Amino acid sequence: MIAAFPETTPLIIAVDGPAASGKGTIAKALAAHYALAYLDTGKLYRAAGLAVRLAGGDPADAEAAAAAAAHFDEALLAVPDLMSSANSEAASIVSAHPGVRAALLARQRAFAAQPGGAVLDGRDIGTVIAPHAPAKLFITASPEIRAARRHRELAASGDARDLAAVLADINARDARDRGRSAAPLRQAADAALLDTSDLAIGPAVQQAIALVEQALGRDRQQQG
Ligand code: DC
């Protein structure tokens, strides 16, 4: 008899967590390890925020933001300003509008459901986009460590900001992403927690793979 999993069920790995927690690096490494497609869903919200800014609009304007999310130019996904600190704030603001989230939902669900399986990272993958994903991780780290990482990334891309300002941005973004009523950032009840505060990239990825294997083992047992 042919086993129902994993041969016939696409593997979906949901990776959520706050800014600069290491979730993107870990999600990409998991996609490479399991040969799955990868989507950084934060880029979709960043593109919507950038589209509003380029049009001279206000990210707090729910209608303008929802229209931008429904029709943004795909070329925006490759613009360097997409990842800037100014655009991080715009992305966080537009992402709180329910109309923006609704406009981006189908695209993310379709990506998750592709036959070859997928890894998605974001804030609501395990709770809203793919609540039935067999493997879910919630990646975190202290705000100070995340600010130091983000500060290094920004400096490397020529965006020189002082560390205190980056920490203030991270705290403001966390509060907005956790406090909004539409799909707030939170750990799904069945997600495994991975705190990367004291971990280098290599060990963090190894632990993430071990947690995914545990989750898949549990899932196989439940199916069998
Ligand atoms: O992952 P990131 O830092 O690039 O995301 C930018 C913003 O987009 C983040 O502050 C909140 C929002 N976001 C979201 O609300 N839901 C997601 N699935 C991904 C990102």
Image (cartoon, grey):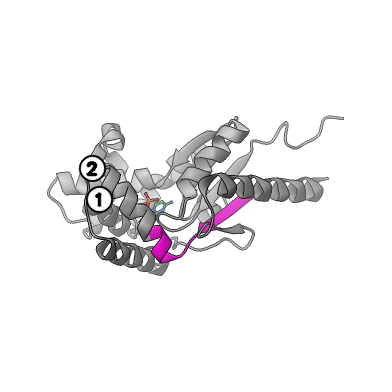
Q: Identify the magenta region.
A: 134-146
Q: Which mark is residue 99?
A: none
Q: Residue at x 25, y 54 (%)?
A: 90
Q: Residue at x 38, y 65 (%)?
A: 174
x and y, in percent, of residue 179 in the image: 39, 69
Above or below — where is 39 with respect to 125?
A: above
Determine contact: label 1, label 2, CB under 8 Å: yes
| Image quadrant occupied by the C terminus | top right
Is residue 152 within the magenta segment?
no
Q: Residue at x 15, y 52 (%)?
A: 57
Q: Quadrant of residue 193?
A: bottom right
Mark 2, residue position: 81
The reply, left or right, for residue 25 in relation to residue 208 is left
The reply, left or right, for residue 169 in relation to residue 146 is left
User: The residue tagged with tag 2: helix, strand or loop?
Assistant: helix
- Queried on whether the Cβ of the residue with tag 2 lies below 8 angstroms from ligand 1, the answer reads no
Q: Which mark is residue 87?
A: 1
